[in-house]
Amino acid sequence: MPLLYSLACGSVLLLAFLLSTNALRVNQLANRWLGLFLACVGCVLLGRVLPGTAVVAQYPSLPGWLELTRLAMAPAFYLSVVQFTAPNRSLEWRDGFHFLPWLLFLLLLLPALLGLGPAGVTWLPSGIGRALVFAMPKVQAIGYWLAAYLALRRHQRHLLHLTAQPEPIDLQWLKQVLWGLALLVGLWLNELFFHLGWVLTLTPAGYLGAVFYLAHYALRQPEVFAYSAPVRAEIQELWQEEQAQDQDSPDLAPSPSPKQSRLSPSQVAYWQQRLRQMLEAEKVYLEADLSLPALAQRAGLSTHELSYVLNEGFGVNFFQFINAYRVAEAHRLLASTQHQHLSMVGIAFEAGFSSKTTFNTTFKKVTGLTPSQFVQEVRAGKAPLPAPPSGAWLPPMGSVG
């Protein structure tokens, strides 16, 4: 088993180096925080490899130094998630507060780690001192895990206001990493409390597999917010307004409109008509990479103003607005005899979708039928017109094509 721990340790430290040195040239600050988290994980794994070696005999305080990094793991991972999900966030001095427990324990343990005397926690009653040292990493792990999970959920909701195709940048891989971390915490707790033999046997392989899984996705990540600095600042401001009034609503439901009135009612009505004309005449919804900033630039609006028009004028978010047109286009293609040679994926791509999953989910949401069911209805001669659920999804379907 030391061999598996050694492989996991070496792999995670290499991945930490690649991310920390910005080898990918994407999501720079987020990857530096992620690299710090992985470096801490590597130190903890190294602490499992060293016992009984000549290195520990020569440097007896080294395991203590390595174990201390455990208190920096959870904050570093959380700050990485925060940075991945923030369009325009820079390093803030307040971020240092997350590492106060680590700093406190460093100061308390420093005399012992330097061989200058007993640890500073000796002034506490022995039971309290041991409980504090034992409980802090567990409390941190649970608290920061929950905070990171909520940040990722909020990010995935926010993306519906930014893009009609969120999959490439929805950080689902990072959400899966969170569940992997939950599993690793479970393995750790088993080592401490339950001592299930078969789980202990699989634990080293579990750590190694988790490292390879993370490396696979981390080294393929795209830039989450590939926009200019002014546009990122606008998106950040927009999301802060939405977050201030965030409600735990279904993923595809429009969030409440921003409180600040960006346009007058007459201006909103004008831009409603202008957007309808633009989409029906130019069919920009067929562009798979169309985003809120890109459409705003074409329309001559700011990103914030376009979001306001969609929320106030149409009662939908960007995801719903663009994909309603795409569903209408797919509806036309599926009902056309000239396009029967296309597969479902081909129909999806022709209509502007770049994900079969989004196509299937959105088509059923708008029409009440899956694409396959709709084709069956067409062949039976009784295909219904797509009806937006609860009248919430616009635009008029019959006008597309």
Image (tube, helix red, strand yellow):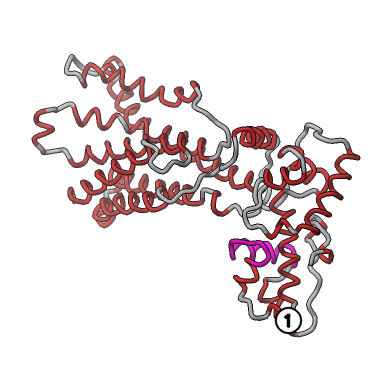
Depth check, front residue: 401 or 175 = 401
As displayed, is residue 126 above or below residue 304?
A: above
In what element is the residue under mark 1? helix
Residue 311 placement (x, y as % from top left): 78, 44
Task: Examine the rendering and report whether any part of residue 392 can be seen.
Answer: yes
Query: Does the magenta segment cover residue 235?
Result: no
Query: Does the magenta segment cover residue 356?
Result: yes
Q: Quadrant of residue 43?
A: top left
Looking at the rendered structure, the kind of residue marked 1 is Thr
Q: Is residue 63 left or right of residue 134?
A: left
**Residue on which disc 1 sits:** 337
Q: Is residue 49 left or right of residue 155?
A: left
* Extreme residue toward the right, this view: 266
Task: Examine the rendering and report whether any part of residue 257 can be seen.
Answer: no
As displayed, is residue 361 above or below residue 273?
A: below
Residue 211 placement (x, y as % from top left): 33, 49
As displayed, is residue 173 above or below residue 34?
A: below
Query: What residue appears at the point 81 percent right and 50 percent down from the top-left corner?
Result: 275
The span shown in magenta is 350-367
Query: What residue appears at the point 72 percent right and 73 percent down from the top-left corner?
Result: 333
Counting other residues with Cα less than 10 Å from the Cα at mark 1, is it few (<14), some (14-19), or many (20 or more)? few
Q: Is residue 90 left or right of residue 342?
A: left
Residue 9 placement (x, y as % from top left): 25, 44
Depth check, front residue: 128 or 24 = 24
Depth check, front residue: 24 or 177 = 24
Query: What residue appears at the point 63 percent right and 33 percent down from the top-left corner?
Result: 230
Query: What residue appears at the point 76 percent right and 85 percent down from the top-left corner?
Result: 380
Depth check, front residue: 188 or 88 = 88
Dominant SS of magenta comes to helix
Count of marks placed on residues? 1
